[in-house]
């Protein structure tokens, strides 16, 4: 059995860091990485003045950073969001092939028809969507502010169309009591967590806390001690009193969880059903397409650049800016 941890695995030598700093500086570039990417990419972003964050903070960081090139290690919608918020910057990704099942499952034509059938409803879309879907929306949200935003709309008497994640939508509906029509999309990673096997694991580790991303099925969320976005789950790992956690989200997050709570233990929540040999495959296949090799290649070649139709940028920037302005009102003074 290996005794190394993701934190150790991610260790970069001083010479490595220096080499990467030169590569990034030569392109006036900063690296913006999601918590689900390879821990070595996360470590690199940290060591070179970039950021490792959830999708909301990635958007904010990219918009506010002075670099003329943003290198977004994550999935396609994250690169597009960066481009929409900073159209004058060059946005590169280690690979443009990295997409998301939620984005794939919400084609703009079908979604527009759905919205057109309910013109009286406010359209709220999750950040995990294409630029074209965002351009059709009144609001964009990420999981870190979804409950707050829908609560705000509900208090104002608005009825909502929610897309694309049906599990996150159902969770938000339950938390807020809002009238929500849900698009039936799902995340192929979080959808796989199995409540009954998780409950079995909890019986093995009765003192363990359970951390769950709200893209997971309702029965999994029901077992959680904390439900939240990736950054909220990392915060919960630090602040909750448990010494051990079972974590229902992409396991690359363990890198930051172990940094945040080095004396605690983290176990992957099960994705396989009873009797299966694979206990968990909780790793997003698209996030995994981001590697140090293709990062180096894109910095050298400048290919894999994100372009968004300017007509879409003009419309999609409005719900994104609304999201960032709303998020600012939630930050503690
Ligand atoms: P966060 O905004 O919580 O980082 O979620 C993004 C995501 O794709 C989760 O699967
Ligand atoms: Fe999309 Fe799920 Fe991957 Fe997140 S983990 S990027 S929601 S497929």
Image: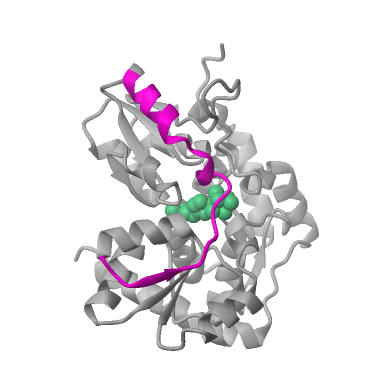
The image shows residue 268 at horizontal and vertical percentages of 46, 30
- For image coordinates 51% across by 24% down, the residue present is 274
What residue is rendered at 55% in x and 78% in y? 114
- The residue located at (35%, 39%) in the rendering is 211
- Quick one: 189 or 305, which is closer to the camera? 189
Asked whether residue 145 appears in the rendered view, the answer is no
* Residue 195 % position (x, y): 41, 35
- Name the image quarter holding the N terminus: top right
Residue 111 in the image: above or below residue 2: below
Q: Is residue 273 magenta?
A: no
**Is 212 displayed left or right of 42 in the figure?**
left
Which of the colour schemes (rainbow, by chain, secondary structure, one colour) is used?
A: one colour
Q: Nearer the viewer, residue 295 or 182?
A: 182
Q: Quick one: quadrant of the C terminus?
A: bottom left
Depth check: 3 or 267 in front? 267
Front position in the image: 28 or 165: 165
- At a point 31% along the width and 39% down the height, the residue shown is 224
Magenta span includes 185: yes
Tell me where residue 205 sits by quadrant.
top left
Is 246 drawn above or below residue 235 in the view shown? Answer: above
Residue 198, given in percent of the width and then of the height, sits at 41, 30
Q: Where is residue 173 drawn, in percent x and y?
A: 33, 63
Segment colored magenta: 177-203
Q: Quadrant of residue 283?
A: top right
């Amino acid at each position: 059995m290996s005794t190394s941890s993701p934190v150790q695995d991610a260790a970069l030598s001083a010479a490595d860091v220096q080499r990467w700093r030169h590569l990034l500086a030569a392109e006036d570039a900063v690296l913006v990485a999601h918590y689900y990417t390879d821990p070595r990419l996360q470590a690199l972003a940290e060591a070179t003045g970039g950021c490792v964050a959830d999708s909301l903070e990635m958007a904010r960081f990219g918009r506010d950073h002075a670099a003329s090139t943003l290198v977004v290690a994550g999935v396609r919608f994250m690169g597009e969001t960066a481009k929409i918020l900073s159209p004058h910057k060059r946005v590169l990704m280690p690979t443009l092939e990295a997409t998301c099942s939620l984005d794939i499952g919400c084609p703009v034509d079908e979604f527009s028809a759905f919205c057109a059938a309910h013109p009286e409803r406010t359209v709220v879309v999750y950040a995990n969507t294409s630029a074209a879907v965002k351009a059709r929306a009144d609001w964009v949200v990420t999981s870190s502010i979804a409950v707050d935003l829908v609560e705000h709309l509900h208090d104002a008497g608005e009825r909502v169309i929610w897309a694309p994640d049906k599990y996150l939508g159902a969770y938000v509906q339950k938390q807020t009591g809002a009238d929500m029509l849900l698009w039936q999309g799902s995340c192929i990673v979080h959808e796989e967590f199995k409540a009954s096997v998780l409950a079995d694991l909890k019986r093995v580790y009765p003192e363990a806390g359970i951390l769950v991303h709200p893209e997971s099925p309702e029965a999994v969320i029901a077992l959680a001690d904390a439900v939240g976005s990736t950054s909220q789950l990392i915060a919960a790992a630090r602040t909750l009193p448990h010494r051990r956690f079972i974590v229902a989200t992409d396991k690359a997050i363990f890198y930051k969880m172990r940094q945040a709570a080095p004396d605690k233990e983290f176990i992957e929540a099960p994705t396989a059903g009873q009797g299966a040999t694979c206990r968990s495959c909780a790793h997003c296949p698209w996030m995994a397409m981001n590697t140090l090799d293709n990062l180096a290649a894109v910095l050298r070649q400048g290919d894999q650049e994100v372009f968004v139709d300017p007509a879409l940028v003009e419309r999609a920037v409005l719900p994104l800016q609304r999201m960032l302005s709303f998020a600012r009102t939630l930050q503690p003074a």
